[in-house]
Image (cartoon, rainbow, N blue to C red):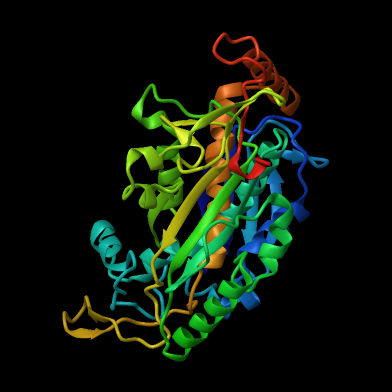
């Protein structure tokens, strides 16, 4: 079973992530992890912390000479600003110099203080911070690498930011990732990119923030991941939970779910065709996002994560209550971004990659990468002998149609 755990606080000594269940023999380098972490820092409208974070990575265990050992992988991401916070965040007995008693609306501050009995909001916000997602992205490097052994590629792009929406239809392919990351807002449409940047500038001028939508697409996802047999095995449910776990993400859409809810059934589903020359089933649309009945269809996987505007503002205007005095006040300001939607997409890639990698290992198994791939190949070969699935039984994604 593939799983991972993270630990660490936003301004603590660093973050730690442990990944368990990876097969042996997966090629990986620390530079690949650094590249993914650098992608998480991308995006116009990010705050000053993105300019000072260097994400110093150390592989503590589970990798030898560039390959996984099959044992748990441990990754440490040091906080380059730790010297500034060592006294305030010290694990040694003592008291902080400043107590934060004005919880910020839209954050975990107040609910966390009440749940755990804290008098200082920093005891909550340090762990609830989106900084934790750096550890997920580091782990996601391994999940993407494992999926890459099956020919699966995962990438994201921003399709909406504030009131600006990119025109539907054009989706980046794996070879377009460099172009997407080169966009200041990680949008695949040039005109929408310019409008999004203008919207960020306007919000920044007002000391406000913007939310938006990042779409994650998966190419080459094999048929058969997930299951309809039990509620907690459904692939779309697993994807939704993984994406909703990202801080500030408040909604998840699989495929064209919102649009097709307003259509008749005759217009809402992905018709199936038999492609005789290529001996495969073909879908010419991806309304279902590559998942039917909780199982991957083998078509293009599409999932969207909807992020709310960040609740920490550069112009404090949100009313709150000082928990010590019970008097009304304004929420305090912590260093913040105008928007983090472009970066959220990179985190969403990691979470989608985790779900797909975990389900692929559940489906195909294997203690080594070679065995894992061999088992997948055997499954694909067996599809050709199924009475209901002549040929290879593969389903071509929408993007591969002529």
Residue at x 48%, y 33% (from the top left corner): 271
Q: Quadrant of residue 19?
A: top right
Locate residue 264, reporting x and y percent.
32, 43
In-image side of 125 versus 167 (left or right): left
Locate residue 129, reporting x and y percent.
45, 65
Locate residue 82, reporting x and y percent.
59, 71
Whether residue 248 is visible here, answered yes or no, is yes
Instruction: Check the image and report above or below for 371 versus 317.
Output: above
Between 66 and 160, the one lying in front of the other is 160
Q: Residue furthest left?
A: 326
Q: Quadrant of residue 313?
A: bottom left
Q: Residue furthest right?
A: 65
Residue at x 51%, y 74% (from the top left corner): 87
Residue at x 39%, y 47% (from the top left corner): 257
Q: Give the quarter of the figure containing the C terminus.
A: top right
Instruction: Check the image and report above or below for 329 versus 156.
Output: below
In-image side of 69 versus 46 (left or right): right
Whether residue 91 is visible here, answered yes or no, is no
Between 137 and 69, the one lying in front of the other is 137
Between 248 and 134, the one lying in front of the other is 248
Instruction: Check the image and report above or below for 39 versus 312.
Output: above
In-image side of 285 versus 124 (left or right): right
Q: How many marks?
A: 0
Residue at x 65%, y 60% (from the top left corner): 37
Q: Give the quarter of the figure containing the N terminus.
A: top right
Locate residue 218, reporting x and y percent.
60, 44
């Amino acid at each position: 079973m593939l799983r991972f755990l993270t630990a660490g606080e936003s301004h603590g000594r660093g973050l730690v992530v442990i990944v368990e269940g990876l097969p042996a023999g997966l090629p990986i380098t620390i530079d690949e992890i650094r590249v993914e972490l650098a992608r998480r820092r991308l995006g116009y409208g990010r705050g000053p912390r993105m300019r000072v974070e260097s994400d110093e990575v150390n592989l503590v265990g589970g990798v030898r000479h560039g390959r996984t050992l099959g044992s748990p992988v441990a990754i440490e991401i040091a906080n380059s600003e730790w010297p500034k916070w060592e006294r305030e965040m010290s694990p040694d007995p003592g008291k902080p110099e400043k107590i934060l008693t004005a919880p910020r609306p839209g954050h975990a501050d107040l609910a966390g203080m009440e749940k755990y009995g804290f008098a200082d909001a920093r005891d909550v916000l340090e762990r609830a911070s989106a900084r934790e997602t750096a550890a997920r992205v580091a782990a996601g490097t391994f999940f993407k690498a494992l999926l890459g052994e099956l020919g699966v590629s995962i990438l994201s792009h921003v399709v909406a930011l504030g009131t600006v929406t990119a025109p539907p239809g054009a989706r980046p392919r794996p070879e377009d990732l460099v172009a997407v990351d080169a966009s200041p807002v990680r949008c695949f449409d040039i005109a929408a990119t310019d409008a999004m940047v203008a919207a960020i500038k306007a919000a920044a001028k007002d000391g406000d923030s913007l939310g938006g939508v990042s779409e994650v697409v998966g190419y080459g996802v094999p048929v058969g991941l997930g299951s309809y047999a039990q509620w907690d095995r459904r692939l779309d449910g697993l994807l939704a939970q993984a994406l909703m776990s990202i801080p500030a993400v408040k909604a998840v859409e699989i495929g064209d779910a919102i649009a097709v809810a307003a259509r008749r059934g005759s217009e809402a589903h992905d018709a199936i065709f038999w492609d005789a020359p290529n001996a495969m089933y073909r879908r010419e649309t991806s309304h279902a996002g590559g998942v039917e009945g909780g199982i991957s269809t083998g078509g293009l996987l599409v999932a969207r994560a909807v992020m709310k505007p960040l609740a920490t503002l550069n112009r404090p205007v949100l009313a709150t209550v000082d928990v010590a005095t019970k008097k009304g006040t304004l929420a305090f300001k912590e260093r913040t971004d105008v928007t983090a939607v472009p970066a959220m997409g990179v985190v969403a890639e990691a979470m989608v990659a985790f779900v797909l990698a975990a389900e692929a290992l559940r489906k195909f198994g294997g203690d080594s990468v070679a065995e894992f791939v061999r088992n997948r190949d055997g499954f694909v070969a067996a599809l050709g002998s199924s009475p209901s699935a002549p040929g290879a039984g593969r389903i071509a994604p929408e993007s591969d149609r002529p």
